[in-house]
Amino acid sequence: MTLSTSRLDRFISKQCRVSRRDVRLMLAQKRIRVDGAIATNIDQIVDKFSHIMLDNKVLQANQASYVMLHKPVGVVSATKDEQHKTVLDIVNLPESVDKASLHLVGRLDLNTSGLVLLTNDSRWSERLTSPDSKVEKLYRVTLQNKLNEDYIEAFNQGMYFGYEKITTKPAKLAIISDHVAMVSLVEGRYHQIKRMFGRFRNPVVALHRVAIGSLTLTEQLKVGESRLLTPQEVAGI
């Protein structure tokens, strides 16, 4: 979902129903401002988050939104679903945020709980989900059977998935107790964690995403609650 862009003259021409020749004159007369600065170049590239004014009249003032949600089990990571509640159904945000414009930054299974991110900024979401970014996702995993040290090396080596014909990237596993482990991944293959523990014939009883990069769920955000990220959090991840 790439953020669409446009040349400034095309944007003004379409919004105001004037010719591009007229736009050139507007620029020469210093009547157009982009993000607070007087625009002078018809080739200037703008996007849906560029603040654009003509003669002190706002033509565009969309705001980027970044949302953290504590997803419960039983809620589907989608914007529409005929059978289950979706993440958009449960997010509670200020009226200034257009919920319909949000999309998911990665997904969690129906029966997986934890941190979910939503945004209307596709550049940000693409950066977070790109394999080149190597953003770590941290999960707390509860297993049916006891863990042992063999799991640590197996996860660290990566595992070959014959169906996709790929080997997973190394994953970090820390044993917390006999039946609980913390697993850190930099990718998100289909049911990856469950399939990796499946190699040990050890069913996953519960799966909870604790963190994405520097963003961590805390006790302040209860199950089912959501909030906007701060500018510092958006930049820091």
Image (spheres, rainbow, N blue to C red):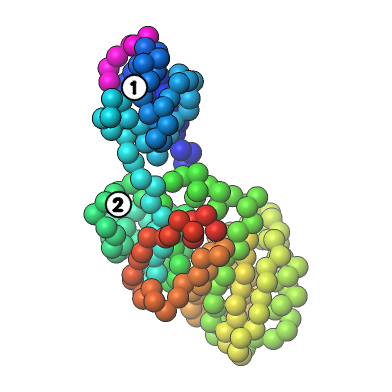
Residue flagged by tag 1: what amino acid is it?
A: Arg
Give me the residue at 46% from left, 41% from top: 1
Q: Residue 154 occupies which quadrant of the picture? A: bottom right
Where the C terminus falls, by quadrant?
bottom right
Q: Residue 38, relative to residue 24: is it above or below?
A: below
Instruction: Looking at the picture, tell me which residue is in the foreground, 73 or 213.
Output: 213
Q: Where is residue 84 in the image (x, y as percent from the top left)?
A: 30, 63
Per the rendered image, the range of residues in magenta is 16-22
Quarter occupied by residue 22: top left
Q: Earlier in the sequence, mark 2 or mark 1?
A: 1
Crowd tier of the residue under label 1, counting other residues whose Cα lies within 10 Å: few below 14, some 14–19, many 20 or above:
some
Q: Residue at x 69, y 61 (%)?
A: 169
Give the residue at mark 2.
97
Q: Nearer the viewer, residue 215 or 168?
A: 215
Look at the image and tell me whether residue 76 can be seen. no
Residue under circle 1? 31
Residue 56 found in image quarter? top left
Label 2 vs label 1: CA separation? 29 Å
Picture coordinates of residue 164 (x, y %)? 64, 54
